[in-house]
Image: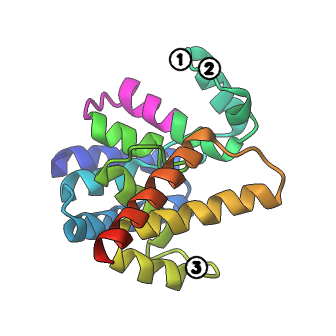
C-alpha cells in the first residue's frame, strides 16, 4: 500500500477508534514493519495491515452482530461465544466492502490477527506478534515475548498462542479451532527446526 492509501486509512481510523486504540494501531504498524524487515516479509504491507488491524475494535458488540447479519457472515457457535474475536472478522469484511481493499494478504492478516490459523503466512505471523509486542503494550511477560520475537517468529507465535489459549482454558471458554490449528502448525515448525539443528 502506498503512503496516500495509508493516509486515507488513518482518516477512517480517526473516526472509528478512540485515542487509545488509534495509538495502539500506529504502534502495531511500526512493530509489524520492524518484524517484517527482520523476517523477510513485505514491510509496507506489514505496516498497512498493522495500521488497520483493529479498525472495528471500538464497534459495540450489538453493532458487530448487525454488521455480520447485513454482510451474510455466519458465526459458528464457538465464535459466537468469543466476542473478543468479532472485530477481526468484521475488520476484514469492512476493509473489503467499505474501504475496497483488494490485497488478500492484508485482509487475511487482519482476519486472523486474534486467533491465528493453520498455514499462517509470514505477514499473518508478523501482525499477530506485532499486536502482542507493540511499544504501547505493558502486561506481565511482554518483555519476554519481545525477546522471543527477536529470536524466532515461530517461537513467538507459539508463545502468543499459549498465552491466548491458556487464558481461554482458565476461563472455561471455547478455543477457536483456528487457534488450535495455528498452535499445532507453529509447534511442529519449532520441532522440525530443533531436529534439524540436533
* Among numbered discs 3 and 2, the one appearing first in the sequence: 2
Q: Are marks 3 and 2 in contact (CB under 8 Å)?
A: no
Residue at point 53% right, 33% down? Answer: 90
Whether tag 1 and tag 2 are in contact, CB under 8 A, the answer is: no
Tell me if residue 95 is in the magenta stretch: yes
Q: Earlier in the sequence, mark 3 or mark 1?
A: 1
| Label 1 sits on residue | 71
Toward the viewer: 101 or 198?
Answer: 198
Query: Residue at point 71% right, 34% down?
Result: 78
Dot 1: element: loop
Q: CA distance from mark 1 to mark 2?
A: 9 Å
Q: Is residue 31 visible?
A: no
Look at the image and tell me whether residue 146 can be seen: yes
Q: Residue at x 30, y 54 (%)?
A: 122
Q: Secondary structure at mark 2?
A: loop
Q: Position of residue 47 (x, y in %)?
A: 28, 57
Label disc, if present, on residue 138 of the rendered structure: 3
Total of numbered circles in the picture?
3
Quadrant of the rendered structure where residue 76 is?
A: top right
Residue ID for mark 2: 74
For the point 37% across and 28% down, which residue is it? 96
Please report the bounds of the magenta region as a residue range. 90-103
Amino acid at each position: 500500500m502506498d503512503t496516500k492509501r495509508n493516509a486515507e486509512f488513518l482518516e477512517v481510523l480517526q473516526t472509528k477508534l478512540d485515542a487509545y486504540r488509534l495509538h495502539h494501531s500506529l504502534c502495531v504498524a511500526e512493530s509489524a514493519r520492524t518484524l517484517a524487515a527482520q523476517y523477510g516479509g513485505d514491510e509496507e504491507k506489514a505496516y498497512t495491515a498493522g495500521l488497520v488491524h483493529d479498525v472495528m475494535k471500538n464497534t459495540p458488540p450489538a453493532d458487530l452482530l448487525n454488521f455480520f447479519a447485513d454482510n451474510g457472515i455466519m458465526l459458528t457457535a464457538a465464535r459466537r461465544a468469543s466476542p473478543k474475536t468479532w472485530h477481526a472478522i468484521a475488520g476484514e469484511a469492512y476493509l473489503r466492502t467499505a474501504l475496497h481493499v483488494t490485497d488478500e494478504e492484508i485482509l487475511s492478516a487482519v482476519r486472523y490477527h486474534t486467533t491465528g490459523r493453520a498455514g499462517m503466512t509470514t505477514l499473518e505471523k508478523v501482525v499477530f506478534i506485532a499486536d502482542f509486542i507493540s511499544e504501547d503494550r505493558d502486561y506481565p511477560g511482554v518483555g519476554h515475548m519481545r525477546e522471543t520475537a527477536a529470536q524466532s517468529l515461530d517461537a513467538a507465535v507459539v508463545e502468543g498462542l499459549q498465552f491466548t489459549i491458556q487464558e481461554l482454558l482458565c476461563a472455561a471458554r471455547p478455543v477457536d479451532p483456528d487457534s488450535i490449528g495455528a498452535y499445532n502448525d507453529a509447534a511442529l515448525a519449532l520441532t522440525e527446526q530443533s531436529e534439524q539443528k540436533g
